[in-house]
Amino acid sequence: MSRGRSSWGRPDPAAGELRRVLDERWASVPAVPASTFLGRWTRLLVVSPHRDRVPTGLEALCADASRAGVEVVVSDDRPGHASSGSPSGRTLVIAPWTSEEPFEQHGADVEVAHHLSRDGAAEHAELPWSRLLVLEASPEVACAPHPDGSAPPPLIPGCTVLVTRRDASGESLDRPHLEPRPQPRGATFDAMFDDGEDPWDSGSWYERRKRALTLAMLQRPRYARVLDLGCSTGVLTRELAGRADVVTGVDASARALAVAGRDTPPGVVWVHGEAPAVLDGLDHLDDVALLDHPDLLDLAVVSEVGYFLTPFEWWLTLGALVRRLAPGGELVLVHWRHATADIPLDGPSVHAAARTVLAPLVRSRHEDPDFLVDTFGVAP
Ligand SMILES: C[S@@+](CC[C@H](N)C(=O)[O-])C[C@H]1O[C@@H](n2cnc3c(N)ncnc32)[C@H](O)[C@@H]1O
């Protein structure tokens, strides 16, 4: 019997929190930095049922607007009335997305957009996929602790989801401002090998202790198929190989993999590629092992990689990894927890997003002074 990964091993797609992140259609939704999108507005008028509170799902965009000097006004008025009397400059009115809410055009200086909240998405079984646009928060906003821990999380952590007026083939409010996704970052990581073959200092006490604790957090003594995403020179990959039949080490850096490849234990395969895209291209490896369900993973490890991804790329990566987990499969995340610079996320924001998005799968957590380990698991 043929058992495709789309039908095997996935958690129940109807399971509330998980349903959205597991949807493969997000991969074709365009994303831009919020700062790029905001560049054409001088004023953001947010329509909220509570006059003094930014609605859930718009906090990050409003924070980036304030950082960019865009005036943010919260109003409980409808867009048509709220936009009247706007000062000079261009105003964007953002109202919640509901199927009854028509798009409105208020002249050259005022336009209306609709944002998709977690609640709004839940109401819409079928999202208007071809008209979605993801705005990604700046690192400063995406990494900021949420001021009110009790507020419901946005649909995609660190992102605002807008419903644009027309689909990708037409002119619309937002899409003329799209920029291509960032170029593959392999070259950045390759350059780290200019100064030596161990840029991450894999023999340091921090790294050794982190690997030992990561391995100790694994639920089972052995696994059939394991993925080590962002494996670099393969130090952790080789340790995982001692507990697995097959381990696929994936990395964006060809130079890291060239070093890794000099010591390849039986059952280890190295793959050059960048998450999230690479995760859809691993099926060609199925002939490396005669496993029952070779294209599914019993364990996926993501150690010190998530913060190099943008918030939306992290969401896509989480979805792709969980889609690939076999029944009973585990996902383990490990990240340094101190401040980062010049990269999209930090360890706490990476883990907070995962624990929100994959809430029904949360298994265990280790809070080290220097790093976080979170484990997730799907039902056997
Ligand atoms: C800090 S090292 C982590 C190495 C190892 N996982 C560990 O914990 O010791 C980060 C690695 O992730 C890789 N990387 C960064 N972004 C990636 C992406 N989007 N897809 C795959 N690998 C990525 C880099 O090339 C680098 O080798």
Image: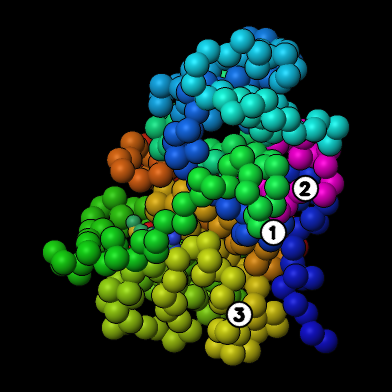
Identify the residue at horizontal 52%, vertical 24% (top origin): 90
Contact (Cβ within 8 Å) of mark 1 with mark 3: no
Q: Residue at x 46, y 28 (%)?
A: 64
Q: Nearer the viewer, residue 15 or 139?
A: 139
Q: Position of residue 262 (x, y in %)?
A: 29, 83
Mark 3 close to ligand 1, CB under 8 Å = no
Q: Which residue is mark 3?
A: 283
Element carrying mark 2? loop
Marks 2 and 1, how far apart at CA = 10 Å
Residue 3 falls in image quadrant: bottom right
Q: Which residues are magenta?
A: 116-133
Within 10 angstroms of label 3, few (less than 14), some, or many (20 or more) residues? Answer: few
Q: Are marks 2 and 1 in contact (CB under 8 Å)?
A: yes
Q: Is residue 254 left or right of residue 30?
A: left
Q: Is residue 108 magenta?
A: no
* Mark 1 surroundings within 10 Å by alpha-carbon count, few (fewer than 14), some (14 through 19), many (20 or more): few
**In the image, what residue occupies the spot 79% across and 85% down?**
2
The front one of 356 and 102 is 102
Helix, strand or loop at disc 3? Answer: helix
Neighbours of disc 2 within 10 Å: few (<14), some (14-19), many (20+): some
The image's mark for residue 25 is: 1
Q: CA distance from mark 1 to mark 3?
A: 19 Å
User: Outermost residue toward the left?
Assistant: 195
Q: Which amino acid does the dot numbered 1 rest on? A: Arg
Residue 127's disc is 2
Picture quarter containing residue 160? Answer: top right
Residue 365 vertical placement versus 217 (above, below): above
